[in-house]
Image: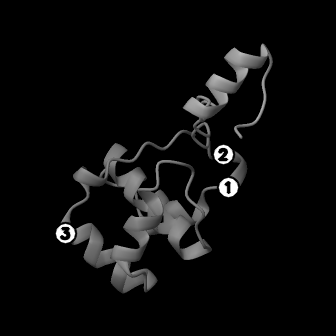
Amino acid sequence: MKFSFDMGAVTAGDIEYIEEELGIDFVAFQDKVSTGGPPRLRGKEMVGLLYLAGRQANPEFSLADARAVKLGEIEAPAVPTVAPAAPNRAVRRTTARNGAVGTAR
């Protein structure tokens, strides 16, 4: 089961509901979810995210449905890869002078 999540589609009622029912501080929750990588969530936060994502796909999706999702059923998003940084100017000059990768002096 793949859950996609659009923070812009969350309603004020959804926010109120997960804050009241799960005791989640939505601002802190939003910060964790909006990091760009897979979020590191505690149990209640995971249920909240599953609930919000499930509701976006199916308005009848309930908190009980979110609690029933098995971890093996969740398709986590791929971890973004970071390209290696380009060498700085000093390293490029040293390399050009010595013909090999070196350290700046």
| Label 3 with label 2: CB-CB less than 8 Å | no
Q: Which residue is outermost to the left?
A: 12
Q: Nearer the viewer, mark 3 or mark 2?
A: 3
Q: Residues within 10 Å of mark 3 (few under 14, many from 20)?
A: few
Q: Earlier in the sequence, mark 1 or mark 3?
A: 3
Residue 8 drawn at (x, y percent): 23, 52
Quadrant of the drawing holding the C terminus: top right
Which label number is shown at residue 12? Answer: 3
Q: Which residue occupies 24% across, 51% down?
A: 9
Residue 39 drawn at (x, y percent): 55, 58
Report which residue position mark 2 lands on.
73
Q: Nearer the viewer, mark 1 or mark 3?
A: 3
Q: Is residue 58 visible?
A: no
Report which residue position mark 1 lands on.
70
Quadrant of the drawing holding the N terminus: top right
Kindly report the distance in space between the C-alpha atoms of the residues bearing marks 2 and 1: 5 Å
Kindly report the distance in space between the C-alpha atoms of the residues bearing marks 3 and 2: 28 Å
| Image-quadrant location for residue 92 | top right
Residue 14 drawn at (x, y percent): 28, 68
Q: Earlier in the sequence, mark 3 or mark 2?
A: 3
Residue 97 drawn at (x, y percent): 71, 17
Kindly report the distance in space between the C-alpha atoms of the residues bearing marks 1 and 3: 27 Å
| Label 2 with label 1: CB-CB less than 8 Å | yes
Which label number is shown at residue 27? Answer: none
Three-letter code for the amino acid on which mark 2 is drawn: Glu
User: Disc 1 on helix, strand or loop?
Assistant: loop
Placement of 2 over or under 102, stated as above or below: below
